Image (cartoon, helix red, strand yellow):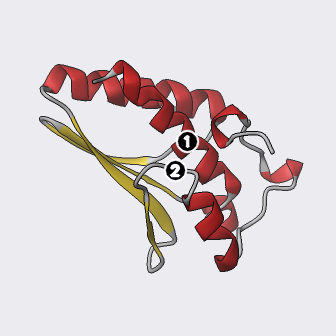
């Protein structure tokens, strides 16, 4: 199986589907410290940085990934933190795209430490 960070997000026309609850634990286990919020049908993670510059650099890197994948997270940004949340509105819940995008964001972290 191809690692999540090396996969490409799908469009609804390519067969994108909502994931079943029983599929989520295996996908979450491939991510670093992302949490599932069932009431919102999201996965989310908070990241901390040493200063505002690094926080915004991280946000810009997320924007670059989101644009390339055509899958965009919700972001909560503060001075030294950023919380990233994913859901797929097109399927009204979580899809593989959420996990692919989260894995790509996790792969960024070595650039921001």
Q: Position of residue 5 (x, y in %)?
A: 63, 36
Q: Is residue 12 left or right of residue 57?
A: right
Query: Looking at the rendering, in which quadrant would you find the N terminus?
Result: top right
Residue shown at the point (34%, 30%) measured from the top left: 59
Residue 27, disc = none
**Image-based side of 9 in relation to 113, left or right:** right
Q: Residue at x 73, y 37 (%)?
A: 7
Residue that badge 2 annotates: 31
Tag 1, which secondary structure?
helix
Quadrant (top left/top right/bottom left/bottom right) for the C terminus = top left
What percent of the width, then of the height, locates residue 81?
A: 20, 41
Tell me if residue 98 comes above or below residue 3 in the rendering: below
Q: Position of residue 62 (x, y in %)?
A: 44, 31
| Relative height, residue 36 to residue 28 (above, below) | below
Say whether residue 74 is left or right of residue 90: left
Seen in the picture, residue 101 relative to 29 is either above or below; the reply is above
| Sooner in the amino-acid sequence: mark 1 or mark 2 | 2
Q: Residue at x 46, y 37 (%)?
A: 106
Q: CA distance from mark 1 to mark 2?
A: 6 Å
In which quadrant of the rendered view does residue 23 lie?
Answer: bottom right
Q: Are the two marked residues, 1 and 2, in contact with CB atoms closer than 8 angstroms?
A: yes
* Badge number at residue 103: 1
Q: Residue at x 63, y 27 (%)?
A: 68
Does residue 106 appear anywhere in the picture? Answer: yes
- Crowding around mark 2 (Cα neighbors within 10 Å: few <14, some 14 to 19, many 20+) is some
Residue 92 visible within the image: no
């Amino acid at each position: 199986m191809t690692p999540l960070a090396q996969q490409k997000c799908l469009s609804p026309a390519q067969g994108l589907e909502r994931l079943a609850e029983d599929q989520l634990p295996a996908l979450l286990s491939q991510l670093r410290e992302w949490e599932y919020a069932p009431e919102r049908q999201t996965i989310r993670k908070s990241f901390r940085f040493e200063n505002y510059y690094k926080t915004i650099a991280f946000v810009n890197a997320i924007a670059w990934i989101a644009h390339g994948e055509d899958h965009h997270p919700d972001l909560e940004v503060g001075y030294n933190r950023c919380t990233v949340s994913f859901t797929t509105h097109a399927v009204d819940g979580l899809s593989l795209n959420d996990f692919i995008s989260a894995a790509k964001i996790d792969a960024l972290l070595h650039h921001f430490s």
